[in-house]
Image (cartoon, helix red, strand yellow):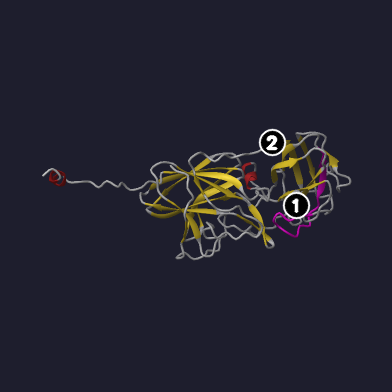
Amino acid sequence: MKVAYLAVVMIVALSMVALAVSPTNVAPIKPNVVSGVAHPTGRPGGETIATATVIPALPFSDAGNTCDFVDDYDEVCPYTGSTSPDCVYAFTPGADVMVDIFLCMSMYDTKVFVYEDAHTPGAPYACNDDNGACGDYNTYMYQSWLTEIAFYAGHTYYIVIDGYGGDCGNYVVDVYEVEPCVVECPPESLLEGEVDCYPNYVDDFNGGLNSTPPVYSHVDCDNETIVICGTSGVFPFASTTYRDTDWYMLDVEVAGTITIGVEAEFGALMGFVDLAGGAFYVSTTTPSCTYATLSYSVPVGPTVVFVSTDSWNTDYVCGSDYYLTIEGYECTSAVEEASWGSIKALYR
């Protein structure tokens, strides 16, 4: 197939739906669930940046409890108003390194953020409250995981382990080196054609039900696998956080099973969306640089495929690449069945 920009088609007959689940672009209101974990017997992390516990080398792992600390710091990523106690670790790399900071094994609603060299309130070097991929590790869905953070030699990075609301409790922190995730656009792919998102970006390209009026990228059927290269990311919008959601409209001519697949430079969410209800028929997530597929039996008519980040993790910078594959999106045959009489008539 040829490389081409996808045409954008506005569908004005559909009304905007207030989305309460994953297809929405705006960060949802988060419930304030306090764990009530008992106070610890020891305090591994430091109270402040000045007294931060030093990480001597990577990989590093430690455990503790934040309830005996006080609330020294807070950052918005994307939820505001936290009064949780926090503790601090410090790391000064001897060489440039890419790291993950992993709190998914913790037992309360965590938040983690990083300052470079000094306390910079309102401008953390990196920040995460909830990382959807943590659901793979335990049943508590509100742990934090900062992925692919660049630490540079000669700088000191202060890792603040915090919580949402007033929550505190037992934490486990792992800091380890990772290879950067890079997704290559397969050759002969279609290009999404949307500009990279940015602060206060208004998505009037293919924002689906998150745009007013709704707008979609139309994908023509093909009897072979379709590959689309696009970008997504998370960005601040007014006083909250948005993500770039991409909605692809399929005009299904042949009912059957369609399989989609995604690999992305971010934790990705993909699915088939019910336009009437504004929710997923089916959906799944996949970690960064991990190709995954999802199948759904679709009837004849319009079908929407959704791709975006799996959370409002501010690590997912605008312009992060992904590719989407679509299989089973077939066209009706252009050859009509002919009668024997009509065939004979051709030779008279």
Image spot of residue 11 (x, y percent): 46, 62
Question: Which of the two residues, 295 or 37, is positioned nearer the viewer here?
Answer: 295
Q: Main secondary structure of the magenta part?
A: loop
Question: Which of the two residues, 108 or 188, is positioned nearer the viewer here?
Answer: 188
> Residue at image x 54%, y 65%?
212
Q: Earlier in the sequence, mark 1 or mark 2?
A: 1
The residue wearing badge 1 is: 163
Report whether 188 appears left or right of 78: left
Mark 2 secondary-structure assignment: loop
* In the depicted structure, whether residue 260 falls above or below residue 201: above
Mark 1 residue type = Gly
Question: Which of the two residues, 239 or 31, is positioned nearer the viewer here?
Answer: 239
Circle 1 crowding by C-alpha within 10 Å: few under 14, some 14–19, many from 20? many
Distance between mark 1 and mark 2 Cα atoms: 25 Å
Image spot of residue 129 (x, y percent): 70, 51
Image spot of residue 5 (x, y percent): 49, 50
Mark 2 residue type = Val
The residue wearing badge 2 is: 178
Q: In this view of the protein, can residue 53 be seen by the observer?
A: yes
Where are the magenta residues, as a range? 74-92
Give yes or no for residue 91 being in the magenta stretch.
yes
